[in-house]
Structure formats: C-alpha cells, structure tokens
Image (cartoon, rainbow, N blue to C red):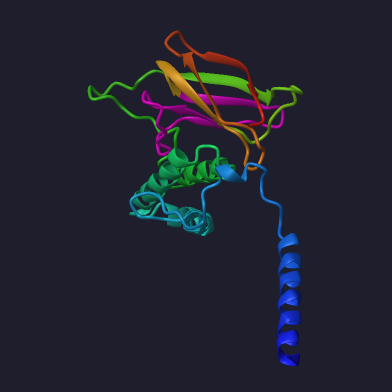
C-alpha cells in the first residue's frame, strides 16, 4: 500500500510539473487554429514547417557568392513549392508573411530577384509601372509596418521568383517599381503574428503608374 500511495503521489507531482512547464511556454498567436500543424508536410519534397524554416535559415547563412552557385535557384524553387502549398492550405497562418519575405530576399541574392527584367518572345521589354500605397489598421488608422504587398498572377497564384513585391515601411507606405502594365491583383500579407487578415484587390496598371491609396487591414 505504501508503494501504491507513493506512486500515486509521484503521478500528481509529475502532472503538476507538466502544468508548470506548459504555463511557461511562450504564448502562441491567438489565431492558432489557422496555423499549419508541425506534422503536416507540404510541396513535392514533403517538407514540414520546421524543415521549411530550417532551409530558410540555411540560405540566410550562405554568403552572397555561395547564393550565386549553380543549383541555388532550383533549390529555392523546391522551397517555394512547399511554401505555396502551405499558403494554399493555411492562407491565414501568421508565420507565412515572414517566410515569403525571406524567400523573396533569397531569390534576389541568388540573382533571380522579382526586379529581374524579363523579355517577351519578340525580344521587346514589357512596359512596367509603379504601384504605391499605404497599409493601415482599419480601426485606428495607424500604419502597419512590415506587411508584404505582392503582385499575383492572373489566376491569383504567386510565384516568388518573379512576382514584383514591396514591403511597408515605418509609415505604412510601399512602392512596387516593376509591376506589369496590365490589370493587376495585389495580395497583402500582414506581418507575422499581427493577427490581421490577408487582403487582396484589383488595380488597373494599363494606364500608367498606380496609386493604390490607403489599404485597411482588419483583425481576423
């Protein structure tokens, strides 16, 4: 009986210790239900969120010369495939915007930046326009810093190896200097962990530079 009582007491002590450890963990964003689970795998390489973040870390540690080595862009394409699959399944995941920013920066360092000029089949350089605007909180009107504004393809998809994009500065403003002179869909990815909902809308770039005005994001 003494042994049973001792084991019973140890069980309660362990439960108390577990609760104490759990309470000491960092708080997760309030929209936890929109976050991708750690044991789900994305893209053709079947990568978890942890693997995606580790690969982004590995690219960050590379020197500029190493980023220009053959095979880097292909590796980034595989990573992009995983992130896009993640985005399709969990579009409101608060960790997505930072991953998109890091992927865009890695493409740029690898010589395949969103600002890279592409030629048409006839050799002519397509006309580009500038898109600018400001991203603010829908309730307070305060600027939102660190949001990513991306020009999506006609079907609404995003290819970070070629998609023009801009990031909002301290006053919430952004400038995308190389958008195609067509009808455009802009996708606003809010800052990581901010709780804002992503937002997309159409603008017309056929007549020249675009002022997208004030874009108001709401808490989801």
Q: Quadrant of residue 120?
A: top left
Residue 44 higher or lower than 189, as above or below: below
The front one of 189 and 180 is: 189
Residue 76 higher or lower than 139, as above or below: below
Q: Residue furthest left?
A: 122
Placement of the C terminus among the 4 image quadrants: top right
Q: Position of residue 131 (x, y in %)?
A: 53, 20
Magenta segment boundaries in residue numbering: 149-178
Q: Residue furthest bottom?
A: 2
Residue 181 is at least partly visible in this image: no
Residue 102 higher or lower than 183, as above or below: below
Horizontal side, residue 157 vs residue 12: left or right: left
The front one of 151 and 179 is: 151
Residue beneath the point at 41% across and 48% down: 82
Residue beneath the point at 75% across and 72% down: 17
The front one of 216 and 183 is: 216
Placement of the N terminus among the 4 image quadrants: bottom right
Q: Position of residue 186 (x, y in %)?
A: 50, 24
Residue beneath the point at 48% across and 45% down: 103
- Magenta region includes residue 157: yes
Q: Quadrant of residue 12?
A: bottom right
Residue 220 is at least partly visible in this image: yes
Residue beneath the point at 49% across and 41% down: 90
Q: Position of residue 85 (x, y in %)?
A: 41, 43
Q: Residue furthest front?
A: 1
Horizontal side, residue 6 vs residue 190: left or right: right
Q: Quadrant of residue 128?
A: top left
Tag count: 0
Q: Position of residue 78 (x, y in %)?
A: 36, 50
Q: Residue furthest top?
A: 207
Horizontal side, residue 195 vs residue 13: left or right: left
């Amino acid at each position: 009986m003494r042994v049973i009582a001792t084991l019973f007491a140890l069980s309660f002590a362990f439960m108390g210790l577990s609760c104490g450890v759990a309470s000491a963990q960092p708080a997760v964003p309030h929209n936890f239900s929109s976050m991708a689970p750690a044991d789900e795998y994305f893209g053709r390489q079947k990568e978890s969120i942890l693997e995606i973040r580790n690969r982004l870390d590995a690219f960050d540690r590379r020197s500029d010369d190493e980023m220009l080595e053959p095979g880097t862009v292909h590796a980034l394409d595989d990573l992009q495939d995983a992130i896009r699959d993640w985005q399709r399944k969990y579009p409101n995941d608060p960790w997505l915007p930072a991953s998109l920013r890091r992927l865009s920066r890695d493409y740029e360092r690898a010589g395949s930046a969103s600002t890279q000029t592409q030629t048409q089949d006839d050799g002519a350089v397509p006309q580009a326009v500038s898109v600018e605007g400001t991203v603010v909180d829908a309730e307070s009107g305060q600027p939102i810093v660190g949001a990513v504004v991306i020009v999506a393809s006609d079907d609404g998809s995003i290819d970070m190896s070629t998609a023009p994009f801009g990031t909002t500065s301290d006053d919430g403003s952004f400038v995308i200097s190389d958008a195609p002179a067509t009808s455009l869909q802009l996708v606003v990815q809010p800052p990581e962990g901010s709780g804002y909902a992503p937002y997309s809308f159409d603008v017309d770039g056929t007549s020249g530079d675009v002022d997208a005005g004030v874009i108001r994001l709401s808490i989801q």
